[in-house]
Image: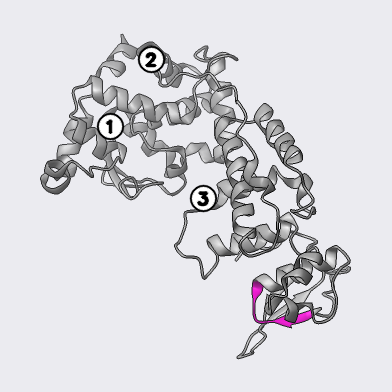
Amino acid sequence: MLRLRKGFGSVRKLTGNRRNCYAVHPPTVKGVRPKALCYTDDYNIGVCVLNAWHNGKYYSGMELDLKERKLDEVVSTGSCTFQGVYEIYWNHKFGESAAKELSKSSRNGMHSAWLKLENIWHRNMDEVTVMELQEIVNGVAKKYSKCTTGRVVGLIKRLYRYAIPRELCRKETGIYVEMPKVKEEEHHADFTDEEIAKLWSAADKTDEQTAAMVKMILTMIYSGFRIGAWREMTVENDVFIGGVKTDAGKNRVVPIHSSITGFVAGMYGEFLCGKSESQFRRDMRRVLMEIEIDTDEKYHTPHSCRHTFHRLLEKAGVSEADRKRLMGHSLKGDITNGTYGHRSVEELKEQIEKIKIEKKKANS
């Protein structure tokens, strides 16, 4: 269940066997919770009541009208602000009664997009024009990536598609928002052999903090995990166990390449140098510029490490099926390898150890 924003009020589930088990309270005043506006058996109705209260349109018995779906009255109360619909939609997607359990990254992605719409949270969905929504999206496109902009556009469309059939709004305004042209960030898809050699050199010759960052970048290059996987990565018997995003990628086993064994042992399980993903991204860019691998115009991202791992496997002659296993890609459609082509840890270790050229090049 979504935690309501600070200052919005609360929809509190009461203990015991009650027909109307949710108490709807206005925001606290000097730390004291005011008397409940009403009691209802539906969390989403409680959110609608709070929205109406904030708009000065709450009236006694509104929760009953909402429950009976007196739609003309419901829409006129102002209960269909963006904030109200988002709270209900969030509960629909991620709450206890959600159709399926979605990942933490899905929740974070949607919430990140929602934060970009802050200026219209309090607005009634029927009052906002297509031009206003498009202007917001265009502003996001100027500051953020294509991926981020796409999430914002997608969220707007989903909110309207959710609200319209439930008659929380009448206009299809948000459905007509278009994805603007976004200038793609320029960065290398992967690290070149020369750049990897520079990293190995920097791991030995730079200050302690820079060296730690470089060692983590090399660890990512020689293992191929997405950045999100490192938060809950485990190490057992010289193998990484982790992964995110897909069924094939989760909890997969990747042997630790001999060239980074010492790095991993020195991290004591604290990966990404103990930083958050966003901080690690910023520091990675700074460090790569310091050691003259990146520039302002062209730079690498943590995902570049994953691209590089695949390139090194391919260059070393590792088969496509084994590359998929090590990368966490699905073998669906490949009946022979998917059904019969099982690999032991020792066999995967043999494959990953075929990557040797870059380490030697760095020491030459």
> Horizontally, is 267 left or right of 95 in the view?
left
Residue type at the position of mark 2: Thr
As drawn, which residue projects farthest toward the bottom? 17
Tell me the magenta residue range. Answer: 38-43
Q: How many marks?
A: 3
The location of residue 323, given as percent across then percent down, is 24, 33
Q: Are marks 3 and 2 in contact (CB under 8 Å)?
A: no
**Secondary structure found at label 3:** helix
Q: Residue placed at 19% from the left, 27% from the top? A: 318
Vertical position of residue 219 compared to residue 115: above or below? above
Q: Residues within 10 Å of mark 1 (few under 14, many from 20)?
A: many
In 3D space, how far apart are the residues under numbered discs 2 and 1 (Cα atoms)?
A: 19 Å
Q: Quadrant of the N terminus?
A: bottom right
Q: Are marks 3 and 1 in contact (CB under 8 Å)?
A: no
Nearest to the eye among marks 3 and 1: give it.
3
Q: Quadrant of the C terminus?
A: top left
The residue to which callout 3 is attached is: 106
Q: Residue placed at 81% from the left, 78% from the top? A: 37
The residue to which callout 1 is attached is: 257
The location of residue 184, given as percent across then percent down, is 55, 23
The location of residue 181, given as percent across then percent down, is 60, 26
In 3D space, how far apart are the residues under numbered discs 3 and 2 (Cα atoms)?
A: 32 Å
The location of residue 241, given as percent across then percent down, is 32, 47
Q: Which mark is residue 190?
A: none
> Horizontally, is 349 left or right of 202 in the view?
left
The residue to which callout 2 is attached is: 192
In 3D space, how far apart are the residues under numbered discs 3 and 1 (Cα atoms)?
A: 31 Å
